[in-house]
Image (spheres, grey):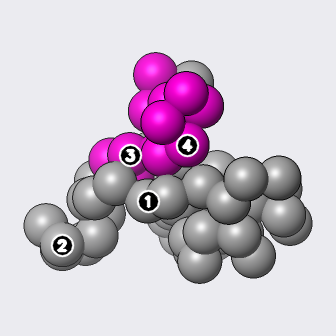
Amino acid sequence: MIEVLIGTGLRKGEALGLHWDDVHLGSRTVYVRWTLSAIDNNKLVLTRPKTRKSSDWVALSPP
């Protein structure tokens, strides 16, 4: 997880919200369409990113 965060610049919630359908290893990209959010500090839910610009393709580093 740490390598993904450092290699992509994703936020923790964006990385934790990734689904395998969003990961394209052949083209080394991921699509951010969900983020893991804490509601009332005790309930975790998947939500859409706050802005449209946050939902985008992100390149993965070769390692």
Q: Residue furthest left?
A: 52
Dot in front, 2 or 1: 1
Question: Would you call the spot at circle 4 few (<14 residues within 10 Å), some (14-19), or many (20 or more)?
Answer: few
Q: Are marks 3 and 1 in contact (CB under 8 Å)?
A: yes
Which residue is nearer to you in this view: 4 or 49? 4
Could you tell which of marks 1 and 4 lies nearer the N-terminus? 4
The label on residue 31 is 3
Q: CA distance from mark 3 to mark 4?
A: 10 Å
Which residue is nearer to you in this view: 15 or 37? 15
Which residue is nearer to you in this view: 44 or 54? 54
Q: Is residue 3 visible?
A: yes
Quadrant where the image shows the N terminus: bottom right
Q: Which residues are magenta?
A: 21-33
Which residue is nearer to you in this view: 53 or 37? 53
Disc 4 element: loop
Q: CA distance from mark 3 to mark 1?
A: 6 Å
Disc 2 element: helix
Mark 2, residue position = 53
Give amino acid for label 1: Val
Dot in front, 1 or 4: 4
Q: Residue furthest top?
A: 21
Q: Are marks 1 and 4 in contact (CB under 8 Å)?
A: no
Residue drawn at (49%, 58%) of the image? 59
The label on residue 28 is 4
Give amino acid for label 4: Arg
